[in-house]
Amino acid sequence: MYINVAYVDDENPNIEDLTTPIKINNCGYYRVHTTPVIETPHPEGRNDYQLLYIAAGKGYFYFKGSKKATIVEKGNMVLFRPKEPQVYYYYAKDKTEVYWVHFTGWKVEQYLDSYELPKKENVFFTGVSPDYPWIYNQIIRELQVQRVNYEDVIKLFMHHIFLTISRYIKEGKQAKNETISDIERAVHYFNENYNKPISIEQYAQEHLMSVNWFIHSFKEVMNVPPMQYIVSLRIAAAKGYLENSDKNINEISNIVGYENALYFSRLFKKYTGMTPSEYKKKNQTRVKK
């Protein structure tokens, strides 16, 4: 079990503030791999909004007092409005990873309408994209460090989340259902096999698709080419090992799919701005504090 949480106000993380257009109360991340079950029982709801993103695995949600669980799988967002019952579970057997942010403000409903987020549904598919974890992590870090103007920065990141969701929903409506299904199937395959050798050309041919069509369609739906998406999965996995294990760089390189540790290190620095060793050192320093 790995938890990374940050609050604006540790003493009162569940506030309604209608003096500002939008305010982030807290943001966090769960990686549920060892603790058997994580339960959130708020049958009376909260005072603020919550937007969750299932990055891996699944969650079991009991909406509006229902006795039957709605299984929410990766690639989906869950939106709770104030006072809506919040009862849900994550299980280690599913290897669930989830991000969430709590926010409030007098203009939130206007923002949700302007970005065309669903009004009635609690759950909506937004794609398995590395963009969402990246944005959530930026909010977490800003809240933890609280540098000058951090409140304005995290508001911008909140709008970034809304914009990314809105873009996916609009592009999804424009694309053919078959195309979406093909890309979702590819995303699932890449997520399950990112640490193995993957040939985009071979994948497309095995699934009876033109290579050019597949690359173009994948980028249209996911906003990045397929190989860049795979690399982002490998980098994200490497970060996890650097943060939470004593494995050396060679071991991590092999685990995430690179036989050449030097090449892996160069790629990691290209994507993160730090070498794996620098990233590990910085992360350990932050955790110790």
Image (cartoon, rainbow, N blue to C red):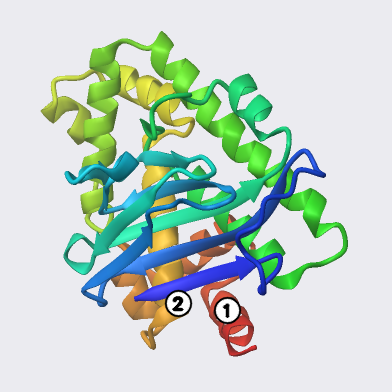
Q: How much space separates mark 2 and mark 1, taking CA atoms? A: 8 Å
Image-quadrant location for residue 244: bottom left
Residue at the outermost front position: 44
Q: Label 1 near label 2: C-beta < 8 Å?
A: yes
Q: Position of residue 28 (x, y in %)?
A: 52, 62
Is 213 left or right of 261, judged from the image as shown? left
**Image location (x, y in percent) of residue 253:** 36, 70
Give the structural element (helix, strand or loop) at label 2. Answer: helix
Residue 283 numbered mark, or none: 1
Q: Assess disc 1: are there few (<14), some (14-19) or many (≥20) residues with their C-alpha within 10 Å of its C-alpha.
A: some
Who comes first in sequence, dot 2 or dot 1? 2
Residue beneath the point at 57% across and 72% down: 275
Q: Position of residue 85 (x, y in %)?
A: 40, 47
Establish if 182 lies above or below 270.
above
- The answer to whether residue 231 shows anywhere in this view is no
Q: Which mark is residue 242?
A: 2
User: On the rendered image, what quadrant is the N terminus found in?
Assistant: bottom left
Q: Quadrant of residue 222?
A: top left
